[in-house]
Image (tube, rainbow, N blue to C red):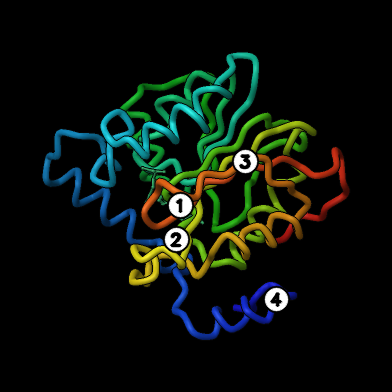
Amino acid sequence: MAAPGGSRRAQGEFDRLQMPTIEWNQRWKRDLEKWTAEGQEQPFGYQWGDPDQMDCLREVRERFLLPYVDPGATALEIGCGGGRWTRDLLGFGRLYCVDIHAEMFHYLLERFGPQAHVSFVRSTGSDLPSVPARSLDFVFSFGTFVHLDPPLVEEYLRNLAPLLRPYAHVVIQYSDKRKPRAAGNPGFAPMDVELMHALLARTGFAVEEEQNETLPHSNIVRARLARAGHPLRAVR
Ligand SMILES: C[S@@+](CC[C@H](N)C(=O)[O-])C[C@H]1O[C@@H](n2cnc3c(N)ncnc32)[C@H](O)[C@@H]1O
């Protein structure tokens, strides 16, 4: 897969490091099956931390998620998994849950019950089929972009932009290979602050705020479209 054009440093990283691809991300379906077969009491996803218990996750929830929940607004979550964050996003008036595995949707249906305001969107990796243009007020993704290689992150951002209302907030947790817990883990994407900001800028986003300190392998950024209504073409 080609590196996004521009940075030589970024190209060097793509050459050097193994990237977590869409194929690599097939593991989450097997993990879910194992979790369910073992009869685990906690919902799938809590093995990576409970947002009610871990300080760094509590901050994510209280600073980057809960203030934006609005029954009059529309949200989209990329990589909903077992619903660790979906639980709070259900407070939006309309919610799109995106994942590459339909099994996650069945799990959420069982966990939360059918909800008239929730739609499930099966992505093949970076597409967002059936989500209407300029319909989203809030986008959230945690535990997912950390495992997406940078060209896929760029494609997602490019595909997302035309679906946003002009002042929408986009909150994404991404891998930071400069942090030791990500550097030693081939499942974490070859990404850092500089590259993520470059991808955001290149796809028409401006960074509004970021937490770089508390998460041990990653950062979380909130961005918005740099220019309301800028013309971007979707990547197929
Ligand atoms: C590590 S789990 C995290 C799930 C949940 N967000 C959480 O924090 O508990 C990653 C989730 O992202 C999904 N996923 C992986 N690659 C994806 C992609 N390219 N697009 C959408 N979802 C993806 C996986 O199927 C899985 O459900």
In the picture of the structure, the residue carrying the numbered disc 2 is 147
> Marks 3 and 1: which is nearer the front?
3
N-terminal-most mark, 2 or 3? 2
Measure how far apart labels 4 and 2 are at the Cα level: 21 Å
Q: Residue at x 49, y 24 (%)?
A: 66
**Closer-to-camera residue (116/25):** 25
Say which mark, if any, is on residue 7: 4
Q: Residue at x 58, y 14 (%)?
A: 71
Are circles 4 and 2 on residues that touch, CB within 8 Å?
no
Label 2: state its secondary structure: helix
Name, please, the residue furthest toward the top. Answer: 71
Measure how far apart labels 3 and 1 are at the Cα level: 19 Å
- Quadrant of the rendered structure where residue 69 is? top right
N-terminal-most mark, 4 or 1? 4
Are circles 1 and 2 on residues that touch, CB within 8 Å?
yes
Give the answer, above or below, for where 95 lies relative to 212: above
- Which amino acid type corresponds to the residue marked 2 in the rendered image? His
Residue 39 location (% of width, % of height):
12, 40
In the picture of the structure, the residue carrying the numbered disc 3 is 209
- Which amino acid type corresponds to the residue marked 1 in the rendered image? Thr
**Closer-to-camera residue (47/94):** 47
